[in-house]
Image: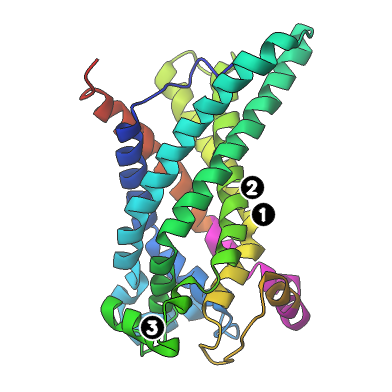
Amino acid sequence: MSSSSEKKHAPWVNAVAGGLGGTAAKSLLSPFQRVVVMQQLGDHKELGTWQLVRYIKEQDGWKGFWKGNLTSMILRVPYSGIQFVLYSQLKFFFQDICERYVRPRQGHAAGVHHRIETLELFIMKCGAGGISATVAGVAVYPGEVVRLRLMSGERKFNGIFNTIRCIYGETNSLRNFYRGLGASLIQRVPDLLISFATYETIKYRLIEMEFLSSHPSYKNIVATVVGGGAAALASILVAFPLDVAKRRIGMSGQGKSKVVYAGVRDCLRRVYAQEGIRGWYAGARVEAIRCVPQVVLMWFFIEGCQQFLTGYCVH
């Protein structure tokens, strides 16, 4: 049932490739992420994109565009590794179950069979992406809170350990490290399940099409670029407002407004009331400029690492 172009790799290969590939791609595009986060938080909404770029440079110099990147890299290695190894294992697990128990009971014409198979693959990849995003998201969320505070631009958050002390000192408990976890998962799960499922569905269908060049490497490059770009745009369209809510809830009580949100619905409602639909997509333009090349690069890095590391597997 799985595409003939899809290959199984050892779990450790997927873990290492996912961790390194995801981290490298995210780090390269980190300056865009800093701009997006500050636009999402809403404390500088009077500034346009280029004005905000100048503001960051004036406040922190060029290194300010990588503020929070060290924390991001520390988080990204385990997050991407856990997420990708779980996704890969669950994807083939679900496909095996479907082939064993569902497929033998069905009998359809060739065209209908192909469409049903494509839909089943997409749904199973959505399920695998959702579960892997949930597990990985819970595992690294406290670090995500630290990273967000570092990227917010507030002067009191000027180092990883100092920021950890500040967050803990707000309530003298670990509760603040999990504030906004629900909002984070509500954003992460649809984001990742849509991104993974869209990428692989489009990529492997393109590879199977005859109108592309018969040269395998050319087909793979075109399919990766198109699939990665489509996945990035689809995830932004669906999940970006939830990302805005996640970040604003994570900064509840901080920043200029000191606003405290009761939850995702309350945050989205209040942002819409004050800023309209533009508030839900604050920073989306810069995010698209960042996210499309990041997702494409991530998949090139991951698949390149898989190919390289597979040579070290014992057969």
**Image location (x, y in percent) of residue 28:** 35, 56
Q: Which callout, 3 or 1, points to the residue nearer the camera?
A: 3
120, above or below 180, in the image: above
State which quadrant residue 299 falls in. Answer: top left
Residue 168 badge: 3
Q: Residue under label 1, please give it.
A: 237
Q: Is residue 304 visible in this depiction of the protein? A: no
> Which quadrant of the figure contains the C terminus?
top left
Q: Which residue is mark 2?
A: 234
Say above or below: 199 vs 72.
above
Quarter the N terminus occupies: top right
Q: Are marks 2 and 3 in contact (CB under 8 Å)?
A: no
Determine whether 239 is above or below 2 in the image: below
Callout 3 touching callout 1 (CB < 8 Å): no
Q: Residues within 10 Å of mark 2 (few under 14, many from 20)?
A: some
Q: CA distance from mark 2 to mark 3?
A: 36 Å
Name the amino acid, label 1: Leu
Question: Is residue 232 visible in this depiction of the protein?
Answer: yes
Task: Assess disc 1: are there few (<14), some (14-19) or many (≥20) residues with their C-alpha within 10 Å of its C-alpha.
Answer: few
**Closer to the camera in the image, 93 or 55:** 93
In the picture provided, is 23 more to the left or to the right than 171? left
Q: Are marks 1 and 2 in contact (CB under 8 Å)?
A: yes
Element marked by disc 1: helix
Of helix, strand and loop, which one carries label 3?
A: helix
Q: Is residue 278 magenta?
A: yes
Q: Amino acid at mark 3?
A: Tyr
The magenta region covers 270-288
Q: Quadrant of residue 239?
A: bottom right
